[in-house]
């Protein structure tokens, strides 16, 4: 028997073929599989950035600025090393926790709790971006530029702005994504479809936290 | 319609007791605190680097396994997502060798006045 899809050609055929009932990952909603594949590609992007950073840091003969000092803040009359970054890390981990709970309540079909937990996640995400804006403006006012800085190796600035900028962009997009899905949950758009979408959004959000784990280790602590 | 229902029943939900998430959450806080402590208490050298890497891998592992549910996913999905990034280790390896070489060349040549360097032989300048 001829496949019913073969009658459809052109772009309609492309859509038909890709959406026909064939699956490799049994029991996994297609949206989740697609999100994982996107995150895999994003893993390659971020690893390439971090590898680039490793390469320029290893190759430079100038001293690398000491992150512990560059990112220190004076609080309560004392200079505390890396404190802003530590707070940002805790904010992001907290947001990962609220997201994990949102996914759980989504599957329990508790719309109110899911909505508020996703909203809390988005607010924490926005807080993180706000702190990053503060960090960027502080560094820029101290003369750090992508092409040079007063503290040492010029490559410090380019690696810093590139890596944290791309991560910050991911967080910002994540906040918009979270808000969109949160309000759609509240409006009951997923009552028939099911709440896999909350888990898929959660995957993206946890990934943003995951990338930060590596940035924190390699850029700020190393 | 019947088919759609059968399919919906196929989809496995990642529903786990809340306690699991709370425990991992607390653990992530502790691990982050410990990696911050590495910097705060000025651990240096191999001790510093190995502690940073251990805490990093533990945090990444718990986020992927528990928060992102990879632990409970089917092997086919876990393998499709987790194995390809291993190729990146090759990239990191060759770039580290390259960077070492660049550093060596800069160390040897940089800071020298190029007008004082020995001139290349005449036959090389003809081209």
Image (tube, grey):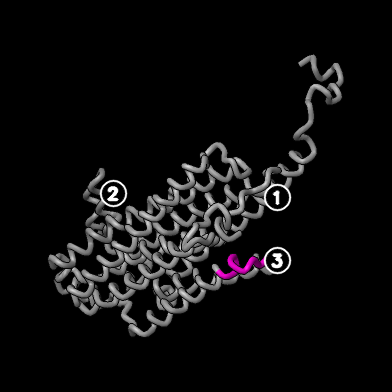
Q: Nearer the viewer, mark 1 or mark 2?
A: 1
- Alpha carbon separation for disc pair 1 and 3: 20 Å
Q: Nearer the viewer, mark 1 or mark 3?
A: 3
Q: Secondary structure at mark 1?
A: helix
Crowding near the residue tagged with mark 2, few <14, some 14–19, many ≥20 C-alpha atoms within 10 Å? few
Residue B3, placed above or below residue B110: below
**Which residue is at the front of the view, B43 or A40?**
B43
Query: Disc 3 is attached to a residue of which chain?
Result: B
- From this viewpoint, which residue is outermost toward the top? B126
- Which numbered disc covers residue B97? 1
Q: Which residue is tagged 3?
A: B46
Left or right? Give the position of A133 relative to A73.
left
Residue located 22% across and 70% down the image = A116
Q: Earlier in the sequence, mark 1 or mark 3?
A: 3
Q: Are marks 1 and 3 in contact (CB under 8 Å)?
A: no
Q: In what quadrant of the picture does the N terminus of chain B appear? A: bottom left
Q: Which residues are magenta?
A: B37-44
Q: Are marks 1 and 2 in contact (CB under 8 Å)?
A: no
Residue A56, given in percent of the width and then of the height, sits at: 62, 45
Residue B25, given in percent of the width and then of the height, sits at: 41, 76
Q: In which quarter of the view is residue A192 placed?
A: bottom left
Q: Secondary structure at mark 2?
A: helix
Residue A197, given in percent of the width and then of the height, sits at: 26, 66
- Alpha carbon separation for disc pair 1 and 2: 44 Å
């Amino acid at each position: 028997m001829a496949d019913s899809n073969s009658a459809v050609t052109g772009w309609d055929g492309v859509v038909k073929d890709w959406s026909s009932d064939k699956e490799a990952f049994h029991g996994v909603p297609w949206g989740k599989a697609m999100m994982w594949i996107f995150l895999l590609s994003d893993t390659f992007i971020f690893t390439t950035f971090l590898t680039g950073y490793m390469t320029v840091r290893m190759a430079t003969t100038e001293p690398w600025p000491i992150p512990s000092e560059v990112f220190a803040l004076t609080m309560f009359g004392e200079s505390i090393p890396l404190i802003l970054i530590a707070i940002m890390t805790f904010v992001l981990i907290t947001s990962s926790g609220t997201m994990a709970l949102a996914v759980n309540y989504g599957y329990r079909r508790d719309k109110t709790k899911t909505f508020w937990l996703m909203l809390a996640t988005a607010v924490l995400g926005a807080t993180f971006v706000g702190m990053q804006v503060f960090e960027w403006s502080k560094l820029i006012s101290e003369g750090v530029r992508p092409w040079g800085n007063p503290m040492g190796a010029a490559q410090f600035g380019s690696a810093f702005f590139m890596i944290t900028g791309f991560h910050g962009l991911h967080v910002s997009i994540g906040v918009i994504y979270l808000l969109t899905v949160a309000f759609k949950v509240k409006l009951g758009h997923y009552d028939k479809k099911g709440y896999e979408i909350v888990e898929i959004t959660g995957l993206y959000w946890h990934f943003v936290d995951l990338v930060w784990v590596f940035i924190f280790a390699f850029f700020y602590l190393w | 319609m019947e088919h759609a229902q059968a399919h919906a029943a196929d989809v496995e939900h990642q529903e786990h007791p809340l306690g699991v998430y709370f425990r991992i959450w607390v653990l992530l806080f502790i691990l982050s605190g410990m990696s911050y402590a590495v910097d705060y208490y000025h651990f240096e050298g191999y001790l510093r680097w190995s502690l940073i890497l251990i805490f990093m891998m533990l945090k990444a592992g718990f986020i992927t396994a528990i928060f992102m549910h990879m632990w409970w996913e089917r092997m086919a999905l876990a393998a499709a997502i987790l194995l390809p990034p291993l190729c990146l280790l090759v990239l990191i390896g060759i770039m580290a060798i390259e960077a070492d070489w660049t550093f060596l060349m800069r160390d040897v040549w940089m800071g020298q006045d190029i007008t004082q360097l020995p001139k290349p032989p005449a036959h090389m300048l003809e081209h």
